[in-house]
Image (spheres, grey):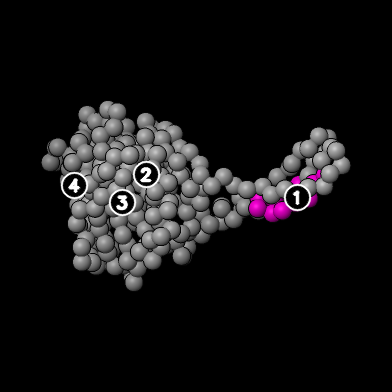
Amino acid sequence: MALGQEIYDEPELRGGQMKILVALSLVLVPLYFHAGSGGDELASRLKQASSTVFELHIGERVFEIGLDQPARVVTPGGETIEVVLRRKAVLHYSGAGVRFDYPSQLEVGTETEDGVTTITLEGTSSPFVLVQVYPASSTTPAAVLNSLLEAFAAEYASKQARALPGSGQPVSRTIGGTRLEGRGLRHDFLGQEIVTEIYSLAKDGAVVAMVFQHDAAERELAEGYFQVIARNFR
């Protein structure tokens, strides 16, 4: 059973709660281990991408060029110019009935189980975003929000993270042009202040949950990333 489904059936909820906690490890682990082994694989992939050599074809001539590395090339007219291959600052995601822009520093992952699609966005720093799309027939925005809030609190407690003052209070964020009310969590885990915002909304016959998470020390970086994703979320 996927996260948030069958929440009206109490026997199923107890089984589903275990599924929720397992799924939440996808959310919590990336933040905890970005500075350690957990982020090594992702950092290695990003580093490999940045060192990839590309071919630039100008007329009949071919030049090898690396990402973000200035190179001098000769045009068919004999003019020597300097070119730089840059990664697009903002990329676009479309799928599972949602679409949004996101910073190119983040990598997208998707998984669908029992009709629920989970989209994750993470990079080598702490900002992390989770988007889940549920069939509207299986739940409601309020039920999803409460389920996620309870599951996050339980997961933090199981990892002996300490709730900080203000944890559990209402938060708000503009998502897709609409100001939404959600719930925020603040925990201390091994000296890191982890900030989590949880929102849910009804959208085109579905229920969408969004989770924004970051280390408080990277608040400015995180807000920049989150605004790109939330601004044009559709």
Q: Which residue is mark 3?
A: 24
Compute the Cα span from label 3 to label 2. 21 Å
> How much space separates mark 2 and mark 4, taking CA atoms?
21 Å
From the image, tell me which residue sits under label 4: 146
The amino acid marked with disc number 3 is Leu
- Pointers 1 and 3 in contact (CB under 8 A)? no
Q: Outermost residue, bottom direction?
A: 191
Can residue 20 be seen here? The reply is no
Check if residue 157 falls in the magenta segment. Answer: no
Q: Compare marks 4 and 1 and give the one earlier in the sequence.
A: 1
Residue 130 % position (x, y): 36, 46
Picture coordinates of residue 131, whole percent (x, y): 35, 43
N-terminal of the pair, mark 3 or mark 2, is 3
What's the residue at 66%, 50% (across, down)? 67
Q: Is residue 229 visible in this depiction of the protein?
A: yes
Please give the range of residues in magenta: 64-74
At 22% from the left and 32% from the top, the residue drawn is: 138
Vertical relation: 157 (above or below) 134: below
> Considering only order in the chain, which callout, 1 or 2, is on the residue closer to the N terminus?
1
Kind of residue at disc 4: Asn
